[in-house]
């Protein structure tokens, strides 16, 4: 007879099913984000994506990976995201310190000749660290619409580290919720004082890929189907190689536009 006790793994998977419902309840906002992003891509521009810490996972989930296509510009600073060494040089303490350094976002965005035809996605589970907040502010100051991905519960329960007390949700034109709880971790265990197993990446990846599917549908409907990074087991080795080269070349052409007018008086603020 099967045990009726719920294992920790079963409990986690059940919580993940709850996250699906949270994401499914945001269909209208997912479609709005897709409208903005598709408009940007059809204009020959880029959707800028930023995430510090583990939020970089969602940036890379959007592009480049199998089932993805050009039109997205990953902005991932290694000083904020390189976690592998944990301690010592390039360790986690430094990354967490830098994520709350005022002015760093302005130096990052200074590298790019943006346009108000661009759009942006900024990810921060808490929505309370300085650099993601200032990245969103930088984009908005340049006339760029900003979509934020946060955990609303985590954001509401957390204290902003920004000097003005604002959060990422205050600097976004549209907010999407991963559904993860305050603190992110979802499973409590007997004998362990603090919960384990976070949920923000699960909810966030569902949001990313739902947006991705909606954007692809809009590009196809507009007569501009994107070159999608596709596995050889699906289309054959030759076709897969062609798609990869085509997608990377298209990305390069779009990214090149971000450097065309750097240093000009109007760089970063033009409308086309």
Image (cartoon, grey):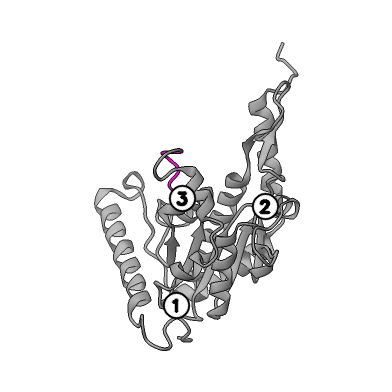
Say whether residue 55 is visible: no
In the image, residue 223 lies in the stretch drawn in magenta? no
Task: Look at mark 2 in the image and give the residue it sits on.
Answer: 151
Main secondary structure along the magenta-highlighted residues = loop
Task: Look at mark 1 in the image and give the residue it sits on.
Answer: 114
Q: Secondary structure at mark 3?
A: helix
Q: What span is in magenta?
A: 81-86
Q: CA distance from mark 1 to mark 2?
A: 28 Å
Task: Look at mark 3 in the image and give the residue it sits on.
Answer: 81
Q: Position of residue 79 (x, y in %)?
A: 43, 53
* Residue at the image point whose x is 36% and y is 47% from the top: 234
Q: CA distance from mark 3 to mark 1?
A: 23 Å
Residue projecting furthest to the bottom: 265
Q: Secondary structure at mark 1?
A: loop
* Residue at the image point whose x is 40% and y is 51% from the top: 66
Looking at the figure, which quarter contains the C terminus?
bottom left
- Horizontally, residue 85 falls left or right of residue 239, namely right
Looking at the figure, which quarter contains the N terminus?
top right
Residue projecting furthest to the left: 238
């Amino acid at each position: 007879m099967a045990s009726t006790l719920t294992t920790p793994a079963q409990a986690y998977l059940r919580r993940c099913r709850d996250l699906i419902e949270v994401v499914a309840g945001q269909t209208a906002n997912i479609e709005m984000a897709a409208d903005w992003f598709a408009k940007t891509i059809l204009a020959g521009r880029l959707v800028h994506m930023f995430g510090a810490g583990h939020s970089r996972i969602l940036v890379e989930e959007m592009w480049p990976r199998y089932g993805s296509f050009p039109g997205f510009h990953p902005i991932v600073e290694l000083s904020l995201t390189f976690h592998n060494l944990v301690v010592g040089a390039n360790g986690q303490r430094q990354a967490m310190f830098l994520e709350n350094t005022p002015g760093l976002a302005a130096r990052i965005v200074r590298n790019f000749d943006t346009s108000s035809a661009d759009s942006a996605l900024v990810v921060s589970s808490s929505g309370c660290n300085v650099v993601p907040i200032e990245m969103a502010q930088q984009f908005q100051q340049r006339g760029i619409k900003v979509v934020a991905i946060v955990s609303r519960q985590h954001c509401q329960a957390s204290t902003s580290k920004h000097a003005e007390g604002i959060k990422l949700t205050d600097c976004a034109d549209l907010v999407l919720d991963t559904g993860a709880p305050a603190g992110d971790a979802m499973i409590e265990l007997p004998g362990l004082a603090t919960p384990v197993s976070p949920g923000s990446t699960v909810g966030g990846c569902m949001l990313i890929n739902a947006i991705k599917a909606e954007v692809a549908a809009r590009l196809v409907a507009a007569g501009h189907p994107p070159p999608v990074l596709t596995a050889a087991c699906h289309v054959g080795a030759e076709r897969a190689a062609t798609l990869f080269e085509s997608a990377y070349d298209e990305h390069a052409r779009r990214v090149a536009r971000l450097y065309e007018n750097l240093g000009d008086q109007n760089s970063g603020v033009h409308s086309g």
